[in-house]
Image (cartoon, helix red, strand yellow):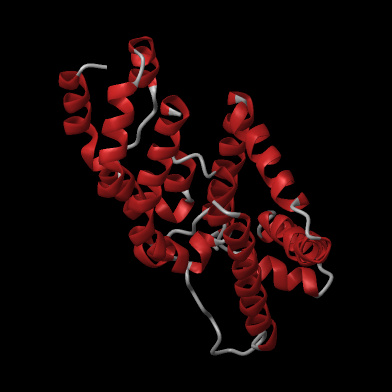
């Protein structure tokens, strides 16, 4: 992929990943084959800020966990009244990190 | 997620569940004991889909199955989890296997893989929620 496209991608999605992962992502994207561009655009990346808003509003029902694909944890969160209300609050602080982790996993499926 | 982290999370959830249940069983019947931990209920005054599961579990410990079902059917799911999981986790720990995690991943895939499964699960939760609100839990 050419440098311009890579920089554009990183500028758009820099908040979607952990800061320390960005140099490695840049390196991998530069080496990536052009044919994988369509796959890259189709990756379902989640905005950590959007997930945080969901977590604050309806995290009590596990919706934040469902959106990230953690269906099992979502069901447990739903059935236990948001983990007795404690898990809901803990997730307000954890969910952005988890979103970045999930984003990295999804991107890694294409890059590696 | 590493296996250690996965099993730790499940273990902590189970332990918290048992502590919460023991506390409720010990204080059961006391007039001053009406704990509400549900953030949604505190904020809106309306019950959430799983409000009443603790009371449903308490009824199960007294053998009142039909009353427990009428209060909140989700109590049965939690009771099943609380009864089966300690043995399953101990088995995995002793035998150094990951059978529970394997089952968890397979079930997660089965449920999130089909649109019909998702739609029917959401419908059940919403139906139970409406029932909870009408019961005024």
Q: Where is residue B42 drawn, in percent x and y?
A: 39, 67
Picture quarter containing residue B103? top right
Residue sitting at x 27%, y 17%: A1
Q: Is residue B36 left or right of residue B2?
A: left
Say which quarter of the image contains residue B20: bottom right
Q: Judge by depth and name the residue closer to the eye, A86 or B127.
A: A86
Q: Residue B121: percent from the left, percent from the top?
A: 61, 37
Taking the view exactly as shown, the residue that stands out farthest to the top is A35
Left or right for B115, reference A33: right
B42 horizontally vs A8: left or right: right
| Residue A75, placed above or below residue B37 | above
Whole-percent x and y of residue A66? Answer: 49, 42
Can you see residue B88?
yes
- Name the residue rendered at 72%, 45% in the picture: B102
The quadrant in which residue A5 appears is top left
Q: Which residue is depicted at the point 43% across and 33% down?
A: A108
Vertical order, A3 against B92 (above or below): above
- The spot of residue B38 in percent (x, y) is 46, 66
Q: Nearer the viewer, residue A81 or A2?
A: A2
Identify the residue at image location x=23%, y=42%: A15
Q: Is residue B82 left or right of residue A16?
A: right
Q: How many marks?
A: 0
Q: Is residue A47 visible?
A: no
Q: Nearer the viewer, residue B34 or B79?
A: B79
């Amino acid at each position: 992929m050419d440098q311009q496209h890579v920089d554009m991608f990183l500028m758009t999605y820099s908040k979607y990943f952990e800061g320390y992962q960005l140099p490695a992502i840049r390196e991998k994207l530069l080496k990536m084959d052009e044919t994988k561009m369509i796959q890259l655009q189709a990756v379902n990346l989640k905005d950590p800020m959007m997930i945080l808003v969901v977590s604050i509003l309806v995290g009590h029902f596990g919706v934040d966990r469902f959106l990230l694909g953690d269906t099992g944890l979502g069901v447990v969160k739903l059935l236990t009244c948001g983990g007795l209300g404690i898990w809901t609050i803990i997730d307000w602080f954890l969910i952005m990190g988890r979103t970045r982790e999930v984003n990295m996993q999804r991107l890694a499926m294409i890059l590696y | 997620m590493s296996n250690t982290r996965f099993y730790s999370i499940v273990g902590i959830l189970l332990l918290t569940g048992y502590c919460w249940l023991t506390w409720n069983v010990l204080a059961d019947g006391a007039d001053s004991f009406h704990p509400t931990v549900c953030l949604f209920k505190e904020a809106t005054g309306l019950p959430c889909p799983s409000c009443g599961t603790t009371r449903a579990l308490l009824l199960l410990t007294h053998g009142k199955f039909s009353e427990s079902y009428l209060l909140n059917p989700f109590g049965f799911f939690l009771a099943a989890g609380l009864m089966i999981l300690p043995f399953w986790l101990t088995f995995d720990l002793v035998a150094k296997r990951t059978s529970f995690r394997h089952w968890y991943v397979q079930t997660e895939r089965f449920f999130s893989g089909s649109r019909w499964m998702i739609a029917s699960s959401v419908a059940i939760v919403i139906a139970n929620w409406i029932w909870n609100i009408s019961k005024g839990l």
